[in-house]
Amino acid sequence: MTQAHLDKFGRPIVVVTGIGVVTSLGQGKEDNWRRLTAGESGIHTITRFPIEGMRTTIAGTVDFLFDGRVAAPNLSEKLATLAAEEAIAESGIGTPGEFPGPLFAAVPPVELEWPERQQLAEAVGHYPIVYHDLLGAAASGKFRPWHERFLFGSVADRLADKFGTQGQPISLSTACASGATAIQLGVEAIRRGETEVALSLGTDGSVHPEALIRFSLLSALTTANDKPEEAARPFAKNRDGFVMAEGAAALVLESYAHAVARGAKILGVLEGCGEMADNFHRTRSSPDGRPIVGCMKNALADAGVTPDDVDYINAHGTSTPENDRMEYVGLKGVFSEEKLAQTPISSNKSMIGHTLTAAGAIEAAVSLLTIQNGRIPPTINYNIPDPAIPLDVVPNVARDAQVRRVISNSFGFGGQNVCLVLAAEPA
Amino acid sequence: MPDVTEGRSRNQRDVWITGIGLVSSLGEGLDAHWQALTAGSPPVTDNTTFAPYVVHPLVKVNFDSQIPKKGDQRQMEPWQRIGTYAAGLALDAAGIAKNAEILSNTDMVVAAGGGERDFQVDAAILNDLSASNDAGRLLNERLLSDLRPTLSLAQLSNLLAGNISIVHGVTGSSRTFMGEESSGVDAARIAYARIAAGQSEIGLVGGAYNAEREDTLLLNDLDAFCMKGAFSPAFTAPGIASGSMGAFLVLESPEHAKARGATPIAKLSGVWSERAKRAVAGAVPAKVKALLDKAGTAPGTAVISGVTGARDATQAEAEALTASGLPVRAVANRIGHGFEAQFIAALALAALAVSKGTLFPPLAGDPLEKAADGISRAIVTQVGHWRGEGAGLVEKA
C-alpha cells in the first residue's frame, strides 16, 4: 500500500465502490435519483392494513414488492436484498454468492406481529384466552418457522447466506442512526486492517399498525393526512412530525488500495465518522445541542477537515418541531455564522419520509449521488420558512452545484448520534 | 483474503478488564458469585411460576442503588432495569462511576434483545378481536388507548444503551448489537478490537436478559427450544433454561488504566466470531475446534462454556470440547442461559476464575464437567442456539 492510499492519519482510505437504494420512490439508484431531484414525494395513504381509528394514516411504505401483507422481517430482508444486489453488481466485487468481506446490517428490532398472535390465539381453541394459553399453542409445533423468522439476527443471517459474506454478520440498532452506524463499523474494520472490503447496509420494512401507533403515542408523527405528499416539511414553520417510511440502502466499502488494484470505479470516499451519545432524555436532545455539536465535530476531526471544507449538509431533518430546531442549534455550534449561511442543507426525508433504521444508509447513498451528479436534491414542502431556522434548505427545487464534501447527520431516539463525512475521490 | 473475523493482528495493545458488573440468580457482584460457585450448591431455579418452563430468577435487587430516580425505573422494562443496574456495578467496580470526564469518552457496545409485551393488554385485545366484525379498526383503537406511551421506548433494543447513557452518563459513543448469542460475542469483539487497535481507550460492553417473561418463552418454544419440567445439566442438552442476568465489563487500554491508577482483574486477549454452515454435518464441531486452536490450549487452560442446552448446538460443542481434553464449566449450569448477555456473563466468570487461579467445582450429573487443577487462562466458548459460534480468551493479568 502506497502513501497515496493512506489518509492524513496514516490509516487506509476507505472508498465506496457500489451503491444500492430502494425507497417508496422506487427501486434502484436511477429511479430514486431522478425522482429525488424532481422533488417528488413517495408519501401516500396507507393501503397495507386498515387505517380506521388511527391518528396518522400516511406513510412512505414500499408497496411494489409483495402483493399482500408480509411480516416486517420479510419485507426488511427483501429491501436489503435488492439494495445489496445493486451495490455488489456495481462494485463488481467477489463472485455471486461469495462476497469477500463481513456484513454490517442495520435492521429493525422484530417481534411476532398481530396476525401471528391472532393465529396462535385461534390455535388455543377457546376464548377468552390468557397470555399463557398462547405458549401451549406455540409448543404445538404448528408455527415452527416463526421462531427463526422473529429472532433479531434472522434478517442479517439470511443476507449472509444469500451473499456469502464472511463470518458472523453484525445486526445492529442505534435507532434512527442505525444506517450510519453500519457504515461506521465497516470503515473501522477496514482501517484496522481486518478486511479490505465490507458490505454495510440499513433496511426497514416495519410499517405495521402497532409500529405506527407506538410512534403516534410518542406524538412523533405528523397528522397531516389530507395531502400525504405535503406532510413531511423539514425546517418549515408548519412542520408537525415525521412520516414513517420504508426502504434500504447498501454500500460496498473498500480500502482505496484494494479498489485501485482491481480497477474498480471509485464512487466516493468515507472520510470520517463521528458519534456522541446524549444523556439528556430518551426522545429529546440536550437543549444546548452539545452531543449533536460533538458528533459533527468528531466526524470532521476524524476526517481531518474543518467546517469550511464542507460544501453541503445532508440533514437528519425529520420534520419534527424539536429535531429540526435542535439540528440548527447544533449546526450553529459547529459552523461560523457566515459559513452556515452559505452552505446548502437539505432533507431527503421531505420526499421519502423517515426510513428509521435505513435512513442513515439511504442518506449516505444520496449524499454520494449528490457529489457524483453535482446536483443537490431539494427540501420539498418548504413554503412557510421558520424564522427561527434561517438556513438555505434548497427549497422545493433541486440545485446544480459542485459538491466535493458532504456531512450527513443521523440522530436517534435513545440519544445515539452519528455524523458521516463523505467526499469525492481524491484528485 | 484476510481473516475478517480475526480479533487481533500484529502491533496491537493489550486490553484489560478493569471492572465487572454481574447480577444473576446467584447474587450480585463478584464476591457473591464466587461464594456461590465454590459452595458447589445446585443452581437456583424456578419451575413453577412459568410451568412447565424452567427459569433462573433474578436475585432480589435494590434497583434504587444504581437507578436512583423512580421516574427512570418506570421508563424501563425489567431487562433494561437489570442491564442498567449491572452497567452501574461495572462502572463502580472500575472506579469510573460519576467520573464525567472519563464517561464522556467511554465507548459503549450493548448486546440487546427487545421489549416485553404487556400480557394483559395482548390477551384482552386478542379476546376482543375474536368477537369483532371490524377487527382492523378495533385493533387500531385498542392499541391507541391501551398501550402505554412509554412502552415503545421500553421495547426498543437500543434503549438499554440509551438508559445507561441517561442514568450513568456514558456518552462517548453508543452502539447496540442484536442477534441473540452472537450479538454478545460481537459486542465484546468490537469493543476489544477498537481498544487493541488504538481506536478507543476505554469501553463498556455488556448485555442483559429477563428470563421471567412469557413472550420470550413463547418465541423459543415455537421451535421447542425450552427446558421443561425439572432442571437438567446443560451438556445433557435438555433444552434452554433461561436465566435472568445482567453482565457488563469495563475494557481499557493499559495506558489509560495506569494513568488513573487502575489495576486489571484479568486480561482479555482475543475475541473471535464465526459462522458455521450448520446444515453441513460436522461444521459446528470443526468451527469450535478452530476457535480453541486459535485461542491456544496451553497447560493451565480451562473452558468456560456459554453452552445453551439447546439440541444440536449443545452436542456439537460437546464433541469439540471433549476432544480438546480441557476442563470445562458451563455457565448455564450456574445461572442459566441469558442469550445476548450469555457471552459477556461467561467472560465475567472466566475473569473471576482466572483472577482466583482456580476453577469452581463441577456440577454433579453434567457429562463434561470434571475436577480440575489451577488455571491461568480461560477460553470462553459460545455456540448460539440456532446460529453463530464465538470464543474469547481471558488470561491472568
Image (cartoon, coloured by chain):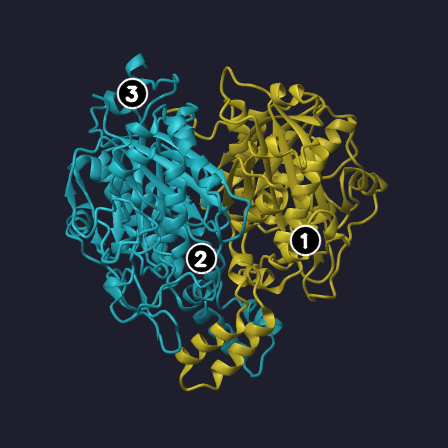
Residue A161 is at least partly visible in this image:
no
Q: Tell me, for residue B69, which label it has, or none.
A: 1
Residue under label 3: A257
Q: Tell me, for residue A149, which label it has, or none.
A: 2
Q: Position of residue B248 (x, y in %)?
A: 64, 40
How far apart are the alpha carbons under marks 3 and 1?
52 Å
Residue at 26% in and 40% down = A367
Q: Position of residue B373 (x, y in %)?
A: 79, 27
Q: Which chain is cyan?
A: A
Quadrant of the frame with the N terminus of chain A: top left
Q: Which chain is yellow?
A: B
| Residue A195 vertical position relative to residue A368 in the rendered view, above or below | above
- Disc 2 element: helix
Q: Amino acid at mark 2?
A: Arg
- Left or right: where B84 falls relative to A339: right
- Alpha-carbon neighbours of circle 2 within 10 Å: few (<14), some, or many (≥20)? many
